[in-house]
Image (tube, coloured by chain):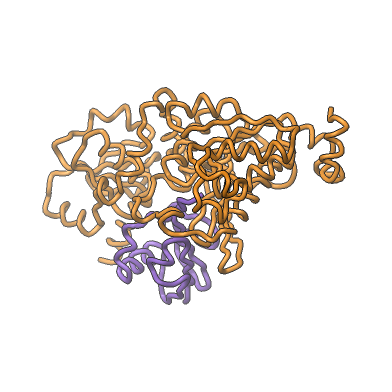
Amino acid sequence: MLSKEENIYYSRHLLLQEIGEQGQLRLKNASVLVVGAGGLGCPVLSYLTGAGVGHIGVLDADLVEKTNLHRQFLFGTSKIGQPKTDAVINHLQDLNPHIYFTEHFLRLIPKNAIDIIKNYEIVVDATDNFPSRYLINDACVILDKPFVSGSIDRFQGQISVFNYPDSEGTNGPTYRCLFPLPPSPETAPDCSQNGVLGVLPGIIGNLQASEVIKMITGTGNILSGKVLVVDTLRSSFYSIAIKRNEHAVEQAMKLKENIINFDYDDFCQSTLSESIKQISSQELSKKLISRDTIQLIDIRENDCLDYIEGSVSIPMSRLDKNISHIKKDIPVVIYCDLGINSLITTKILTDLGFDNVLNLTGGIEAWKNLNENKK
Amino acid sequence: MKVKILFFGILSEAVGKQEMTLTNISDSDTLQSHLISLIPGLKDYTFRLAVNQEFIESNRTLKDGDVVAMMPPFAGG
Protein backbone atom coordinates (compact mmCIF):
# COMPACT_ATOMS: atom_id res chain seq x y z
CA MET A 1 0.00 0.00 0.00
CA LEU A 2 1.07 3.53 -0.67
CA SER A 3 0.81 5.96 2.23
CA LYS A 4 -1.21 9.15 1.98
CA GLU A 5 2.01 11.12 1.60
CA GLU A 6 3.23 8.79 -1.15
CA ASN A 7 -0.08 9.13 -2.99
CA ILE A 8 0.47 12.88 -3.14
CA TYR A 9 4.19 12.61 -3.97
CA TYR A 10 3.63 10.21 -6.88
CA SER A 11 0.30 11.65 -8.07
CA ARG A 12 1.62 12.47 -11.57
CA HIS A 13 2.80 8.87 -11.98
CA LEU A 14 -0.43 7.49 -10.63
CA LEU A 15 -2.31 9.32 -13.37
CA LEU A 16 -0.43 7.31 -16.01
CA GLN A 17 -2.37 4.20 -16.96
CA GLU A 18 0.91 2.42 -17.76
CA ILE A 19 2.17 2.94 -14.19
CA GLY A 20 -0.77 3.54 -11.87
CA GLU A 21 -0.85 2.23 -8.31
CA GLN A 22 0.39 -1.23 -9.26
CA GLY A 23 3.43 0.17 -11.09
CA GLN A 24 4.16 2.58 -8.25
CA LEU A 25 4.05 -0.29 -5.74
CA ARG A 26 6.44 -2.28 -7.93
CA LEU A 27 8.80 0.69 -7.88
CA LYS A 28 8.47 0.95 -4.12
CA ASN A 29 9.38 -2.71 -3.68
CA ALA A 30 12.29 -2.60 -6.15
CA SER A 31 16.00 -2.35 -5.44
CA VAL A 32 18.55 -0.88 -7.84
CA LEU A 33 22.32 -0.51 -7.50
CA VAL A 34 23.86 2.46 -9.32
CA VAL A 35 27.57 1.93 -9.83
CA GLY A 36 29.15 5.35 -10.28
CA ALA A 37 27.76 8.61 -8.89
CA GLY A 38 29.31 10.84 -11.55
CA GLY A 39 28.17 12.17 -14.92
CA LEU A 40 25.78 9.29 -15.65
CA GLY A 41 25.10 8.46 -12.00
CA CYS A 42 23.69 11.89 -11.09
CA PRO A 43 20.79 11.87 -13.57
CA VAL A 44 20.13 8.14 -13.05
CA LEU A 45 20.01 8.57 -9.26
CA SER A 46 17.87 11.72 -9.41
CA TYR A 47 15.17 10.19 -11.56
CA LEU A 48 15.14 6.81 -9.81
CA THR A 49 14.73 8.69 -6.53
CA GLY A 50 11.94 10.83 -7.95
CA ALA A 51 10.28 7.77 -9.50
CA GLY A 52 10.16 6.10 -6.09
CA VAL A 53 12.51 3.11 -6.41
CA GLY A 54 12.26 1.89 -2.81
CA HIS A 55 15.86 0.85 -2.23
CA ILE A 56 18.74 2.52 -4.06
CA GLY A 57 22.40 1.61 -3.63
CA VAL A 58 24.86 4.40 -4.39
CA LEU A 59 28.36 3.13 -5.13
CA ASP A 60 31.39 5.34 -5.76
CA ALA A 61 34.88 5.67 -4.28
CA ASP A 62 35.53 9.23 -5.50
CA LEU A 63 35.60 12.55 -3.71
CA VAL A 64 33.88 15.57 -5.27
CA GLU A 65 36.25 17.59 -7.48
CA LYS A 66 35.81 21.01 -9.07
CA THR A 67 36.10 19.43 -12.56
CA ASN A 68 32.98 17.31 -11.82
CA LEU A 69 30.61 20.21 -11.30
CA HIS A 70 29.90 21.21 -14.93
CA ARG A 71 27.88 18.01 -15.40
CA GLN A 72 27.47 16.31 -12.00
CA PHE A 73 24.70 18.36 -10.45
CA LEU A 74 23.95 16.54 -7.18
CA PHE A 75 26.72 18.39 -5.33
CA GLY A 76 28.02 21.96 -5.38
CA THR A 77 31.22 23.81 -4.59
CA SER A 78 30.63 23.42 -0.85
CA LYS A 79 31.00 19.62 -1.18
CA ILE A 80 34.43 19.60 -2.86
CA GLY A 81 36.65 17.04 -1.13
CA GLN A 82 33.73 15.08 0.35
CA PRO A 83 32.72 11.57 -0.72
CA LYS A 84 30.31 11.73 -3.65
CA THR A 85 28.14 9.00 -2.12
CA ASP A 86 27.56 11.03 1.02
CA ALA A 87 26.84 14.28 -0.85
CA VAL A 88 24.48 12.52 -3.26
CA ILE A 89 22.47 10.70 -0.59
CA ASN A 90 22.14 13.90 1.46
CA HIS A 91 20.69 15.68 -1.52
CA LEU A 92 18.43 12.83 -2.67
CA GLN A 93 17.02 12.02 0.76
CA ASP A 94 15.71 15.58 0.85
CA LEU A 95 14.26 15.14 -2.65
CA ASN A 96 12.35 12.01 -1.64
CA PRO A 97 12.16 10.98 2.04
CA HIS A 98 10.35 7.73 1.11
CA ILE A 99 13.51 6.13 -0.34
CA TYR A 100 15.93 3.90 1.53
CA PHE A 101 19.53 4.48 0.44
CA THR A 102 22.55 2.25 0.99
CA GLU A 103 25.90 4.01 0.76
CA HIS A 104 28.78 2.04 -0.78
CA PHE A 105 31.78 4.38 -0.46
CA LEU A 106 34.20 2.02 -2.22
CA ARG A 107 35.36 0.83 -5.58
CA LEU A 108 33.60 -2.18 -7.05
CA ILE A 109 36.28 -4.88 -7.26
CA PRO A 110 36.17 -8.64 -7.85
CA LYS A 111 36.45 -9.24 -4.10
CA ASN A 112 33.23 -7.34 -3.22
CA ALA A 113 31.21 -7.35 -6.48
CA ILE A 114 29.18 -10.52 -5.93
CA ASP A 115 28.38 -9.74 -2.29
CA ILE A 116 27.15 -6.25 -3.13
CA ILE A 117 25.29 -6.93 -6.39
CA LYS A 118 23.41 -9.96 -5.07
CA ASN A 119 21.34 -7.63 -2.84
CA TYR A 120 19.82 -5.76 -5.78
CA GLU A 121 17.43 -6.70 -8.59
CA ILE A 122 18.82 -4.40 -11.26
CA VAL A 123 22.26 -2.83 -11.71
CA VAL A 124 23.04 0.40 -13.53
CA ASP A 125 26.52 0.68 -15.03
CA ALA A 126 27.32 4.38 -14.74
CA THR A 127 31.09 3.87 -14.49
CA ASP A 128 33.84 5.53 -16.48
CA ASN A 129 36.32 2.71 -17.09
CA PHE A 130 36.57 -0.69 -18.75
CA PRO A 131 37.71 -2.81 -15.77
CA SER A 132 34.45 -1.83 -14.00
CA ARG A 133 32.36 -2.42 -17.13
CA TYR A 134 33.66 -5.98 -17.58
CA LEU A 135 33.41 -6.69 -13.85
CA ILE A 136 29.76 -5.53 -13.71
CA ASN A 137 29.00 -7.61 -16.80
CA ASP A 138 30.59 -10.75 -15.40
CA ALA A 139 29.08 -10.41 -11.91
CA CYS A 140 25.60 -9.80 -13.38
CA VAL A 141 25.92 -12.78 -15.75
CA ILE A 142 27.05 -14.99 -12.84
CA LEU A 143 24.19 -13.75 -10.63
CA ASP A 144 21.66 -13.75 -13.50
CA LYS A 145 20.78 -10.06 -13.09
CA PRO A 146 19.94 -7.58 -15.85
CA PHE A 147 22.00 -4.39 -16.04
CA VAL A 148 21.55 -1.07 -17.81
CA SER A 149 24.76 0.06 -19.43
CA GLY A 150 25.59 3.65 -20.37
CA SER A 151 28.85 5.03 -21.69
CA ILE A 152 29.93 8.31 -23.23
CA ASP A 153 32.60 9.73 -25.50
CA ARG A 154 32.89 13.49 -26.06
CA PHE A 155 29.56 14.16 -27.88
CA GLN A 156 28.16 10.62 -28.19
CA GLY A 157 26.76 8.02 -25.86
CA GLN A 158 25.81 4.35 -25.98
CA ILE A 159 23.05 2.73 -23.98
CA SER A 160 21.74 -0.83 -23.81
CA VAL A 161 20.06 -3.22 -21.37
CA PHE A 162 22.18 -6.35 -21.05
CA ASN A 163 21.43 -9.87 -19.82
CA TYR A 164 17.71 -9.07 -19.82
CA PRO A 165 15.34 -12.06 -19.93
CA ASP A 166 12.69 -12.07 -22.67
CA SER A 167 9.13 -13.27 -22.11
CA GLU A 168 10.33 -16.89 -22.40
CA GLY A 169 13.08 -16.37 -19.83
CA THR A 170 15.98 -16.43 -22.31
CA ASN A 171 18.56 -13.79 -21.50
CA GLY A 172 19.53 -11.23 -24.12
CA PRO A 173 23.05 -10.19 -25.18
CA THR A 174 25.67 -9.08 -22.67
CA TYR A 175 28.37 -6.42 -22.82
CA ARG A 176 30.91 -9.09 -23.81
CA CYS A 177 28.66 -10.06 -26.76
CA LEU A 178 29.03 -6.50 -28.02
CA PHE A 179 32.72 -6.10 -27.17
CA PRO A 180 34.34 -9.48 -26.35
CA LEU A 181 37.63 -7.84 -25.42
CA PRO A 182 38.49 -4.39 -24.08
CA PRO A 183 40.23 -1.84 -26.32
CA SER A 184 43.83 -0.91 -25.74
CA PRO A 185 43.78 2.01 -23.28
CA GLU A 186 45.47 4.49 -25.62
CA THR A 187 42.68 4.08 -28.20
CA ALA A 188 39.81 4.59 -25.74
CA PRO A 189 40.39 7.73 -23.68
CA ASP A 190 37.95 8.72 -20.92
CA CYS A 191 36.34 12.10 -20.21
CA SER A 192 39.33 13.34 -18.20
CA GLN A 193 41.58 12.85 -21.21
CA ASN A 194 39.22 13.63 -24.06
CA GLY A 195 36.62 16.01 -22.63
CA VAL A 196 32.86 15.63 -22.60
CA LEU A 197 29.90 17.86 -23.44
CA GLY A 198 28.30 18.51 -20.04
CA VAL A 199 24.75 17.80 -21.17
CA LEU A 200 25.63 14.42 -22.76
CA PRO A 201 25.70 12.28 -19.59
CA GLY A 202 22.40 13.96 -18.66
CA ILE A 203 20.79 12.60 -21.82
CA ILE A 204 22.29 9.11 -21.53
CA GLY A 205 21.71 8.84 -17.77
CA ASN A 206 18.07 9.83 -18.17
CA LEU A 207 17.62 7.16 -20.83
CA GLN A 208 19.16 4.63 -18.42
CA ALA A 209 16.74 5.67 -15.67
CA SER A 210 13.87 5.37 -18.14
CA GLU A 211 14.87 1.77 -18.98
CA VAL A 212 15.06 0.89 -15.27
CA ILE A 213 11.59 2.31 -14.62
CA LYS A 214 10.13 0.41 -17.60
CA MET A 215 11.79 -2.83 -16.47
CA ILE A 216 10.36 -2.52 -12.96
CA THR A 217 6.86 -1.47 -13.98
CA GLY A 218 6.67 -3.83 -16.97
CA THR A 219 5.88 -0.97 -19.32
CA GLY A 220 6.90 -0.48 -22.95
CA ASN A 221 9.75 -2.11 -24.86
CA ILE A 222 13.11 -2.70 -23.22
CA LEU A 223 16.32 -1.74 -25.01
CA SER A 224 17.63 -5.31 -25.01
CA GLY A 225 19.28 -6.86 -28.08
CA LYS A 226 20.31 -3.49 -29.43
CA VAL A 227 22.51 -0.58 -28.55
CA LEU A 228 21.20 2.95 -28.93
CA VAL A 229 23.84 5.47 -29.95
CA VAL A 230 23.02 9.10 -29.27
CA ASP A 231 24.96 11.76 -31.14
CA THR A 232 24.46 15.30 -29.88
CA LEU A 233 26.35 16.84 -32.84
CA ARG A 234 24.31 15.02 -35.48
CA SER A 235 21.17 15.31 -33.29
CA SER A 236 20.58 11.65 -34.06
CA PHE A 237 19.52 8.47 -32.32
CA TYR A 238 20.99 5.41 -34.07
CA SER A 239 20.05 1.92 -32.99
CA ILE A 240 22.08 -1.20 -33.87
CA ALA A 241 20.95 -4.79 -33.27
CA ILE A 242 23.27 -7.09 -31.24
CA LYS A 243 23.12 -10.89 -31.09
CA ARG A 244 23.88 -12.93 -28.00
CA ASN A 245 27.23 -14.74 -28.37
CA GLU A 246 27.31 -17.80 -26.13
CA HIS A 247 31.12 -17.96 -26.25
CA ALA A 248 31.35 -14.42 -24.95
CA VAL A 249 28.80 -15.20 -22.21
CA GLU A 250 30.82 -18.28 -21.29
CA GLN A 251 33.88 -16.07 -20.64
CA ALA A 252 31.91 -14.48 -17.81
CA MET A 253 30.24 -17.68 -16.56
CA LYS A 254 33.52 -19.55 -16.20
CA LEU A 255 34.63 -16.98 -13.58
CA LYS A 256 31.76 -18.11 -11.33
CA GLU A 257 34.00 -19.82 -8.79
CA ASN A 258 37.06 -17.60 -9.06
CA ILE A 259 36.05 -14.07 -10.03
CA ILE A 260 37.95 -12.90 -6.93
CA ASN A 261 41.20 -13.92 -8.58
CA PHE A 262 40.53 -12.30 -11.94
CA ASP A 263 42.54 -9.13 -12.45
CA TYR A 264 40.28 -6.79 -14.44
CA ASP A 265 42.82 -3.95 -14.41
CA ASP A 266 45.38 -6.24 -15.99
CA PHE A 267 42.79 -7.64 -18.44
CA CYS A 268 42.07 -4.10 -19.67
CA GLN A 269 45.69 -2.94 -19.61
CA SER A 270 47.15 -5.68 -21.77
CA THR A 271 46.52 -4.13 -25.13
CA LEU A 272 45.52 -6.32 -28.02
CA SER A 273 48.40 -5.14 -30.12
CA GLU A 274 50.85 -6.09 -27.38
CA SER A 275 49.40 -9.32 -26.11
CA ILE A 276 47.79 -10.85 -29.18
CA LYS A 277 49.68 -11.68 -32.32
CA GLN A 278 47.84 -11.82 -35.60
CA ILE A 279 48.54 -13.50 -38.92
CA SER A 280 47.00 -12.54 -42.27
CA SER A 281 45.67 -15.04 -44.79
CA GLN A 282 48.60 -14.19 -47.10
CA GLU A 283 51.18 -14.91 -44.40
CA LEU A 284 49.46 -18.15 -43.43
CA SER A 285 49.35 -19.20 -47.07
CA LYS A 286 53.13 -18.66 -47.36
CA LYS A 287 53.76 -20.70 -44.20
CA LEU A 288 51.64 -23.58 -45.50
CA ILE A 289 53.33 -23.54 -48.91
CA SER A 290 56.79 -23.60 -47.33
CA ARG A 291 55.59 -26.44 -45.07
CA ASP A 292 56.43 -24.65 -41.81
CA THR A 293 55.49 -26.69 -38.76
CA ILE A 294 52.38 -25.10 -37.27
CA GLN A 295 49.33 -26.27 -35.34
CA LEU A 296 46.36 -24.93 -37.26
CA ILE A 297 43.23 -25.06 -35.11
CA ASP A 298 39.63 -24.56 -36.23
CA ILE A 299 37.62 -23.50 -33.16
CA ARG A 300 34.19 -23.32 -34.83
CA GLU A 301 31.52 -25.43 -33.16
CA ASN A 302 30.07 -27.34 -36.08
CA ASP A 303 31.77 -29.46 -38.70
CA CYS A 304 32.20 -27.03 -41.53
CA LEU A 305 32.91 -27.97 -45.11
CA ASP A 306 35.09 -24.95 -45.72
CA TYR A 307 38.00 -25.74 -43.41
CA ILE A 308 41.65 -24.96 -44.14
CA GLU A 309 43.67 -28.02 -45.25
CA GLY A 310 45.75 -29.45 -42.44
CA SER A 311 43.76 -27.94 -39.59
CA VAL A 312 42.39 -29.81 -36.59
CA SER A 313 39.00 -29.08 -35.07
CA ILE A 314 38.86 -28.10 -31.40
CA PRO A 315 35.49 -26.40 -30.81
CA MET A 316 35.86 -23.42 -28.51
CA SER A 317 33.37 -24.90 -26.02
CA ARG A 318 35.70 -27.91 -25.57
CA LEU A 319 38.95 -25.95 -25.45
CA ASP A 320 39.49 -26.55 -21.72
CA LYS A 321 39.32 -30.33 -22.12
CA ASN A 322 41.62 -30.37 -25.14
CA ILE A 323 44.28 -27.96 -23.99
CA SER A 324 46.76 -30.81 -23.38
CA HIS A 325 46.60 -31.66 -27.09
CA ILE A 326 48.08 -28.28 -27.99
CA LYS A 327 51.88 -28.19 -27.89
CA LYS A 328 53.56 -25.13 -26.41
CA ASP A 329 56.76 -25.44 -28.47
CA ILE A 330 55.09 -25.36 -31.88
CA PRO A 331 53.46 -22.19 -33.26
CA VAL A 332 49.65 -22.21 -33.11
CA VAL A 333 47.28 -20.48 -35.55
CA ILE A 334 43.64 -20.18 -34.43
CA TYR A 335 40.77 -19.48 -36.79
CA CYS A 336 36.98 -19.20 -36.78
CA ASP A 337 34.44 -17.59 -39.12
CA LEU A 338 35.40 -13.94 -38.85
CA GLY A 339 38.23 -13.79 -36.33
CA ILE A 340 36.23 -12.69 -33.27
CA ASN A 341 35.94 -15.95 -31.31
CA SER A 342 39.44 -16.92 -32.42
CA LEU A 343 40.67 -13.63 -30.99
CA ILE A 344 39.19 -14.59 -27.62
CA THR A 345 40.76 -18.06 -27.88
CA THR A 346 44.14 -16.59 -28.83
CA LYS A 347 43.94 -14.35 -25.77
CA ILE A 348 43.03 -17.33 -23.53
CA LEU A 349 45.95 -19.41 -24.81
CA THR A 350 48.35 -16.47 -24.59
CA ASP A 351 47.30 -15.93 -20.96
CA LEU A 352 47.88 -19.64 -20.31
CA GLY A 353 51.53 -19.25 -21.29
CA PHE A 354 51.43 -20.21 -24.96
CA ASP A 355 53.81 -17.58 -26.31
CA ASN A 356 53.49 -18.42 -29.98
CA VAL A 357 49.75 -18.22 -30.72
CA LEU A 358 48.48 -16.30 -33.73
CA ASN A 359 44.95 -15.26 -34.61
CA LEU A 360 43.99 -15.58 -38.27
CA THR A 361 42.75 -12.05 -39.05
CA GLY A 362 39.31 -12.07 -40.64
CA GLY A 363 38.91 -15.82 -40.09
CA ILE A 364 37.95 -18.37 -42.75
CA GLU A 365 36.06 -15.66 -44.65
CA ALA A 366 39.25 -13.70 -45.29
CA TRP A 367 41.03 -16.96 -46.18
CA LYS A 368 38.34 -17.83 -48.75
CA ASN A 369 38.51 -14.34 -50.23
CA LEU A 370 42.24 -14.63 -50.72
CA ASN A 371 41.95 -17.99 -52.40
CA GLU A 372 39.07 -16.88 -54.62
CA ASN A 373 41.08 -13.87 -55.75
CA LYS A 374 43.93 -16.18 -56.75
CA LYS A 375 41.67 -18.21 -59.05
CA MET B 1 27.61 0.90 -56.34
CA LYS B 2 28.03 3.19 -53.36
CA VAL B 3 28.35 2.39 -49.67
CA LYS B 4 28.16 4.95 -46.87
CA ILE B 5 30.37 4.51 -43.81
CA LEU B 6 29.61 6.16 -40.46
CA PHE B 7 32.46 6.57 -37.97
CA PHE B 8 31.49 6.75 -34.30
CA GLY B 9 33.35 7.90 -31.19
CA ILE B 10 37.11 8.15 -31.40
CA LEU B 11 37.12 6.58 -34.87
CA SER B 12 35.83 9.82 -36.35
CA GLU B 13 38.92 11.50 -34.87
CA ALA B 14 41.23 8.76 -36.16
CA VAL B 15 39.74 9.03 -39.65
CA GLY B 16 39.30 12.81 -39.56
CA LYS B 17 35.66 12.75 -40.62
CA GLN B 18 32.29 11.48 -39.43
CA GLU B 19 31.35 9.70 -42.62
CA MET B 20 32.55 8.85 -46.09
CA THR B 21 31.22 7.19 -49.22
CA LEU B 22 33.14 4.48 -51.05
CA THR B 23 32.33 2.93 -54.40
CA ASN B 24 32.72 -0.63 -55.64
CA ILE B 25 33.39 -2.35 -52.33
CA SER B 26 32.06 -5.89 -52.60
CA ASP B 27 31.93 -6.98 -48.96
CA SER B 28 32.63 -5.94 -45.38
CA ASP B 29 36.06 -7.64 -45.21
CA THR B 30 37.20 -5.78 -48.31
CA LEU B 31 35.83 -2.56 -46.83
CA GLN B 32 37.75 -3.09 -43.60
CA SER B 33 41.06 -3.85 -45.32
CA HIS B 34 40.52 -0.93 -47.71
CA LEU B 35 39.95 1.47 -44.81
CA ILE B 36 43.04 0.16 -43.00
CA SER B 37 45.12 0.68 -46.14
CA LEU B 38 43.81 4.28 -46.30
CA ILE B 39 44.29 4.89 -42.55
CA PRO B 40 46.83 2.36 -41.18
CA GLY B 41 46.30 3.56 -37.59
CA LEU B 42 42.78 2.08 -37.64
CA LYS B 43 44.07 -1.44 -37.07
CA ASP B 44 44.99 -0.55 -33.46
CA TYR B 45 41.38 0.33 -32.62
CA THR B 46 38.73 -1.99 -31.24
CA PHE B 47 35.42 -1.66 -33.05
CA ARG B 48 32.46 -3.63 -34.37
CA LEU B 49 31.05 -3.31 -37.86
CA ALA B 50 27.33 -2.95 -38.43
CA VAL B 51 25.59 -3.16 -41.79
CA ASN B 52 22.21 -1.43 -42.01
CA GLN B 53 21.93 -1.15 -38.22
CA GLU B 54 22.84 -4.75 -37.41
CA PHE B 55 26.21 -5.86 -36.02
CA ILE B 56 27.70 -8.51 -38.30
CA GLU B 57 29.31 -11.73 -37.05
CA SER B 58 30.90 -12.72 -40.35
CA ASN B 59 31.77 -11.25 -43.72
CA ARG B 60 28.78 -9.61 -45.39
CA THR B 61 28.21 -8.86 -49.08
CA LEU B 62 27.53 -5.17 -49.59
CA LYS B 63 25.05 -3.72 -52.02
CA ASP B 64 24.32 -0.27 -53.37
CA GLY B 65 22.99 2.06 -50.68
CA ASP B 66 24.16 0.00 -47.69
CA VAL B 67 25.17 1.94 -44.60
CA VAL B 68 28.09 0.56 -42.61
CA ALA B 69 28.72 1.81 -39.06
CA MET B 70 32.06 1.42 -37.30
CA MET B 71 31.39 1.39 -33.57
CA PRO B 72 34.10 1.47 -30.87
CA PRO B 73 33.40 0.96 -27.17
CA PHE B 74 33.09 4.18 -25.14
CA ALA B 75 34.93 4.50 -21.83
CA GLY B 76 33.41 7.56 -20.19
CA GLY B 77 30.67 7.95 -17.65
Residue at 36% from the left image edge and 43% from the top image edge: A268
Q: Position of residue A220 (x, y in %)?
A: 73, 46
Q: Position of residue A174 (x, y in %)?
A: 51, 41
Q: Position of residue A275 (x, y in %)?
A: 26, 45
> Which residue is more in the foreground, A258 or A294?
A258
> Which residue is more in the foreground, A127 or A78?
A78
Quarter of the image with the N terminus of chain A in it: top right
> Which residue is more in the foreground, B77 or B54?
B77
> Which residue is more in the foreground, A252 or A335?
A252
User: Residue A57's image quarter?
Assistant: top right
User: Residue A240's image quarter?
Assistant: bottom right
Residue at 75% from the left image edge and 43% from the top image edge: A219
Residue A158 relative to residue A134: left or right: right
Q: Which residue reaches farthest front?
A: A78
Which chain wears orange?
A
Residue B34 relative to residue A26: left or right: left
Residue at 32% from the left image edge and 57% from the top image edge: B44
Residue A171 is at least partly visible in this image: no
Quarter of the image with the C terminus of chain A in it: bottom left
Residue A96 is at least partly visible in this image: yes
**Could you tell me how many numbered marks the image carries?**
0
In the image, residue A335 above or below residue B17: above
Q: Position of residue B19 (x, y in %)?
A: 47, 71
In the image, residue A127 above or below residue A229: above
Q: What hue does chain B carry in this figure?
A: purple
